Every structure is written in C-alpha cells, then in structure tokens.
Image (cartoon, helix red, strand yellow):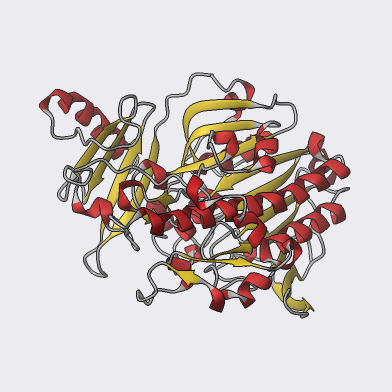
Amino acid sequence: MGKADLSVAPVLWQNVAMTAPAFVLVAMTALAAPKAASTGGRAAAQRPNVLFIAVDDLNTALGTYGHPIVKSPNIDRLAARGVRFDRAYTQFPLCSPSRVSLFTGLRPDKTGVFELKTDFRTVIPDVVTLPQLFGRAGHHVVRVGKMFHYGVPADIGTSGLDDARSWHEVVNPRGRDKDEEDKVVRLLPGTGKGLGATLAWFASDGADDEFTDAKVAAETSKMLEQNRDKPFFIGCGFYRPHVPWIVPKKYFDLYPLHRMEVAKIPAGDRDDKPPPAFTVTPANHGRPDDEIRPLLRAYYASISYMDAQLGKVLDTLDRLALWDRTIVVLWGDHGWHLGEHGLWQKQSLFEESARVPLIIAAPGFAGGKASAAVVETLDLYPTLADLARLAAPKDLAGKSLRPLLVRPTAPWSRPAYTQVRRGAAGSEFFGRSVRTARFRYTEWDDGKRGVELYDHDRDPGEHTNLATLPANAKVVRDMKALLAAARR
C-alpha cells in the first residue's frame, strides 16, 4: 500500500469499551503506525515527542499567573519547567474557530470557521494540520479528549466535529459528570440555553477517577506508556473548566464563598463603549454579589480538579523519564469572563476573553521563566515544527517562538489579532482587535459600529475608551494600520 498519508488514510471505527460510565471510542487508520516520510524512520526517532495539552475555557486564573486564590499546583509545576507566556492571545474567543486556527496555523478569515458547526475541510480541504505534519514525519499521532471542536457537554464520549485525517488513534472518554447533568444548579434557569451556554454547577459526591477529565488523564498516561519507545504527538484535551461545572465536592470546599472576590465594575464602565462590545450571552451585568460568588467558586473548583488530573499525566512523564525528549505545551483555547464589564463566558474582545494561558516546556531550554512578549496561539504551529526540525507549510500566519524560549526577554515586536462575529444570519459583521505591548485597538464593522482604544500601561482593566480623544489620533492611526495589515 505504500507510505501512510494522513490526509487520505481511511478510518475504521471500532468500539473497544462500552462499560458505563466510561464509554471509550477508538479510531484507527486502516494502516498500522505509519512509516516515516522521506526523512526516514531513524530521523523521526531522533526528533522530540510532543505532548499537547488543551484545556477548555481556561483563563489565566492560575497560581503561576499570580492569582491570589486559585490552587493550580500542577500547572505551576509545568511552568517551573518551561516558559510561561504572560501575553498570549487567541485568534477567535470561541472553541471551534480558535482550535482550527491553532491547528491549521491560519487566521479565521482563511479557515472560514466563525462558529461551532463549520467543518474547516469544506473550506480548505487540503490543509495540513499540525498533528498531520507530525504524522507524515513518522510520529504516532493520538487524540485523547477534545482537540478540535465538539460540544461540551452534549458531545462528550463522541468525536464531535473532529478531523479524522489528523490522527492515527483517538479516544473519547466519558465520565460521571455526564450522568449528573440533571442535578445542576443554574443561575438563570429560564433562559432555555443548553448546559454548554449557561452558568451551571454541581458539587458531586463522586471520586476523582469517576469523572471525564480523570479518564482523559488515565488514557493519556496509557498512550504515553504505549508509545514511550517511538516518536509521538499526543493531544490531551481536558474538559473543565467548561460549563457545566460538575466536579467532586472537595474541590468546591477549597474555595469558601466569603473569599470569592467579585469583579469591581466602575460606574459608567459601559458608557464609552460600543454596544457590540457587550453582545455576549449570558450577560449578567448588575447581578448581586451573593449570586456571583457561587459562580466563581465553581469555576475555580473546576480548575483545581482539572489541575489534579493534569498532575497524573505529569507524573507519568516523570516515571517514564520522557521530559528530556518531549516538548510539552499547555494552552487554553480562549479566555473566560468572570464578571468583568458585567460579562460572563467568552466571545468578547476585551482582555479577559482574548488572553489565554500558554506554557511551553521543551528539552534544552531553561525553565521557570516568563515572557512578556505579545504572542498568538497560531504561533504554536511554526514553533513546534521548528523545534522538531520539520518543514512547515509556507502559508502559516504565525512565527516560531524559539527566540523567546532561548531568551524570554528577546526583542519581539509582533502584535496579536483577535476577532469575533456579531449579528443575525444575513447581516453578520465582525469585531476585530489588535493588541500590542501597550495598547488594544478594536473596530466593530470596520469602525462603522464603534471603535475602542485602551492603554494597558494605565488602564489594564480596559475601563476607559480613549479612541475618540484628539490627543490619541496618531495612536489610533497607527493601530488602525496594524489591524488592516492582518487582513492582507
């Protein structure tokens, strides 16, 4: 049959376990682990492995990022081994567009994915994804949990809107949280929204190992064990802290309600901002603090639960002595509002929605360092290709972060771009934002529906819109030119 090509390899679906509550579905290519591409099997064996950890709806409320309350010892432990990027930004603060952008290395305008239903292969059918690149070079590529998009919680236990061409093997864990969805408490029970779009939580009596993220950790550890002696690219996709926040009660107990600090919203915060800036569902502007504190506790509890499961994966890397030949990436697909500007969830162009956690621990680079450079999540594709000495596609929009791994304070002047879509079908328009080291500039519908400018040196909360002040005319012109450059 010749060499395996992940862009065309047929996929055979096979049930390998059907014992509740952990139904696992594994997909295998019709071929065995593919032979290496033209570089040869020996070259592939000498390249570093990749463990790519994606966390759904994780913002920077983490110990390593300076959060005063959240307990994330294992993410902090990973940061101590690698470089933490303090100003990393998603290209689209919604699951499917952000993930497709990262794994293709292309901006959303190129992928054509702006919502949760479009299969990017219908727009760019021949694109080579990041895991495909590694698969073609001889690595065994595996997905455990959520890498490309599928709905949470509805699609847990399935492959959802996955890309079959990108993987040799996939595992779709399902845990107790799926069976306890009818027990959740909702802040807004009358909205009619599905659980993936509401603020809902449940402090379960279950043990850690019964929940989906524990099964993600266990299956990832199993894949590390099985592939320890051959080159691999393993995607490990955790589900929490995506809503509904269903995790063991002991993690809720870590966060007493009286310690939950509700975001302070200055009077008139919305007065100088365009209306599309706040078109996010659900919006809970003005709700009392005693309704907000349980939400903060549930989000933080979900982070700590996920972090504990991540610790099991890191322990496996320790036990198998894989750190000296494995690049480990931890990434959040987008930020998440916790009441700032009266907003919750994602899909805004404010900092809390656009900024993401990003940590890279790679052999040969010093750990425990932080970079303040403004970077984008689509920089990960060229970075991993560079570190693995693979020839990346020529049309990637990002740039390798290698210089910042070598020296986190190295000069870096690239801006970051984030966009969202607003409006009903047939009358959609975009909000587009550019972030530099000092400023964020945003245009809604190319400026026809409003413009925003924030000075992060003086206003990190983005409370004062400076765009219309005559004294800032030159800054606006310069930022406008940067924003236009992203579309050329």
- x then y, percent, for residue 159: 62, 70
Direction left: furthest residue:
470
Apparent side of residue 271 relative to residue 64 in the rendered image (left or right): left
Q: Is residue 473 visible to the viewer in this orientation of the structure?
A: yes
In this picture, is 292 found above or below 461? below
- x then y, percent, for residue 158: 63, 73
320 or 7: nearer the eye? 320
Which residue sits at x=22%, y=49%?
Answer: 444
Which residue sits at x=85%, y=49%?
Answer: 230
In this picture, is 200 found above or below 389? below
- x then y, percent, for residue 75: 65, 41
202 or 120: nearer the eye? 202
The quadrant of the picture occupied by the C terminus is top left
Apparent side of residue 24 relative to residue 346 in the rendered image (left or right): right
364 or 350: nearer the eye? 350
In this picture, is 158 found above or below 345? below
Quadrant assignment, res 413 = top left
246 or 474: nearer the eye? 246
- x then y, percent, for residue 217: 74, 57
Apparent side of residue 474 relative to residue 172 in the rendered image (left or right): left
Quadrant assignment, res 454 = top left
Direction front: furthest residue:
258
Which residue sits at x=44%, y=74%?
Answer: 194
The quadrant of the picture occupied by the N terminus is bottom right
